[in-house]
Image (cartoon, grey):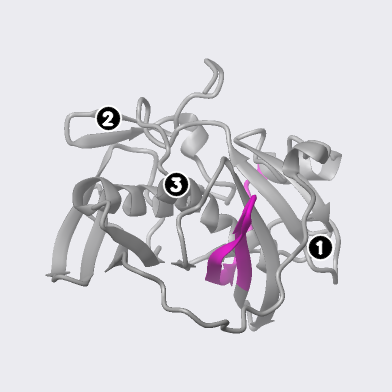
C-alpha cells in the first residue's frame, strides 16, 4: 500500500475510525457497502477464524447506512462443533446496529473422488495483460484497480467480466488475508450485475451473500455477471467469482433503486 492509498479505517482501541475514502457513492452517503461487508467478514475471521476451518458462506444484511463516525463490530459464536462453526456479527454505529453478518465455517478435510459437473467457467487473460480501468466512475476515483475483459459499467445489454485488485488496506496495518481480499471486493457483484448501462450505479444493495468453494490465491479477484432481474425499483443480481487459477465461488445481492452522489454523477458524465 502506497502513502497515497490510505486505509479505509484505522483502529483506536475497540473503535474503527473511517477515513474519507470509506464514503459510498450514494446521495447522503455514509459508508460504502464494500467496507461494511468487508469489516463484518474480516472481524469474524479475526476473532473466530481457524486454519482448520474454511469460511464457505457469508450473508450480510445492510439495513442502515452507517454515517462517517467511529464504529465497532460485535461478534457472537452461535455454534462451534467438530465440523461446523457459525458466527454472527453486528456493525454498531451511533449505539445501534447498522448491519449484520452470519458466517459459516466448515472443517477442512479430504475431498471425495469423482468428477462432478462444474458448469461453464471463463477462460480469461491474465489481468496484468489488460489495460488499466478508468479512474471514475468504475473505480470510485481510484479506490481500487480494475481490468475489464468484457463490457463496462456504461454498456447495456451485455455480460460484464472484470478483474479487481485492492490497492489499500481495509484497516490500517492489517494486511488482507485471502478471505478478506474477496470479501472487501465482493460487494461489487451488485453494481456489476444490477447497474443499467449508460446510467451509472442504479441500485443500492441491501444485502450480499458470498459462497466460497476454496481459498482465493493471488491479489486479483475476477467478477463475471450471470443474471439480473428487476421490477418496481427492486433488483437481484448474481456473479461468478474467480482468482487467477479459476472459479472460487459466487456472490449475489438484492438492490433498491437509488440516486448517486452529485460528485460521482458529475464525474461519470465527464468520463
Q: Nearer the viewer, residue 211 or 111?
A: 111
The 10 Å Cα crowd at callout 3, few under 14, some 14 to 19, many 20 or more, is: some
> Mark 2 and mark 3: span between their CA atoms?
21 Å
Q: Residue 235, located in which quarter of the rendered image?
A: bottom right
* 154 is higher (above) or lower (below) than 229: above
* 253 is higher (above) or lower (below) than 134: below
Circle 3 residue: 178
Q: Residue 232, located in which quarter of the rendered image?
A: bottom right
Tell me which residue sits at (85%, 66%) in the image.
Answer: 156
Q: Residue 123, located in which quarter of the rendered image?
A: bottom right
Count of numbered tags? 3
Quick one: SS at disc 3? Answer: helix
Can residue 57 be seen by looking at this rendering?
yes
Asked whether disc 1 touches disc 2, contact meaning CB atoms under 8 Å apart, the reply is: no
What percent of the width, then of the height, locates residue 80? 14, 68
First in sequence, mark 1 or 2: give its number: 2
Circle 1 residue: 197
Labels 1, 2: front one = 2
> Mark 1 and mark 3: span between their CA atoms?
31 Å
Amino acid at each position: 500500500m502506497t502513502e497515497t492509498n490510505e486505509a479505509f479505517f484505522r483502529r483506536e482501541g475497540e473503535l474503527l475510525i473511517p477515513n474519507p475514502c470509506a464514503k459510498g457513492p450514494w446521495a447522503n452517503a455514509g459508508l460504502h457497502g464494500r467496507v461494511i461487508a468487508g469489516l463484518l467478514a474480516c472481524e469474524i475471521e479475526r476473532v473466530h477464524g481457524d486454519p482448520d476451518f474454511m469460511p464457505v458462506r457469508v450473508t450480510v444484511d445492510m439495513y442502515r447506512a452507517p454515517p462517517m463516525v467511529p464504529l465497532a463490530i460485535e461478534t457472537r459464536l452461535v455454534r462451534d462443533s467438530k465440523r461446523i462453526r457459525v458466527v454472527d456479527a453486528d456493525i454498531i454505529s451511533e449505539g445501534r446496529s447498522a448491519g449484520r453478518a452470519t458466517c459459516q465455517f466448515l472443517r477442512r478435510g479430504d475431498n471425495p473422488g469423482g468428477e462432478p459437473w462444474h458448469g461453464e467457467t471463463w477462460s480469461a487473460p491474465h489481468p496484468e495483460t489488460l489495460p488499466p480501468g478508468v479512474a471514475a466512475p468504475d473505480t470510485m476515483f481510484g479506490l481500487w484497480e480494475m481490468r475489464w475483459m468484457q463490457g463496462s459499467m456504461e454498456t447495456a445489454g451485455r455480460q460484464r467480466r472484470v478483474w479487481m485488485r485492492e490497492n489499500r488496506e481495509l484497516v490500517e496495518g492489517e494486511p488482507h488475508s485471502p478471505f478478506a481480499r474477496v470479501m472487501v471486493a465482493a460487494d461489487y457483484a451488485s453494481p456489476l450485475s444490477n447497474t443499467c448501462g449508460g446510467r451509472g450505479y442504479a441500485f443500492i444493495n441491501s444485502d450480499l451473500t458470498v459462497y466460497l468453494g476454496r481459498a482465493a490465491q493471488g491479489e486479483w479477484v475476477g467478477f463475471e455477471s450471470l443474471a439480473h432481474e428487476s421490477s418496481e425499483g427492486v433488483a437481484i443480481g448474481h456473479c461468478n467469482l474467480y482468482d487467477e487459477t479459476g472459479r472460487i465461488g459466487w456472490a449475489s445481492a438484492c438492490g433498491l433503486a437509488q440516486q448517486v452522489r452529485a460528485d460521482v454523477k458529475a464525474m461519470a458524465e465527464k468520463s
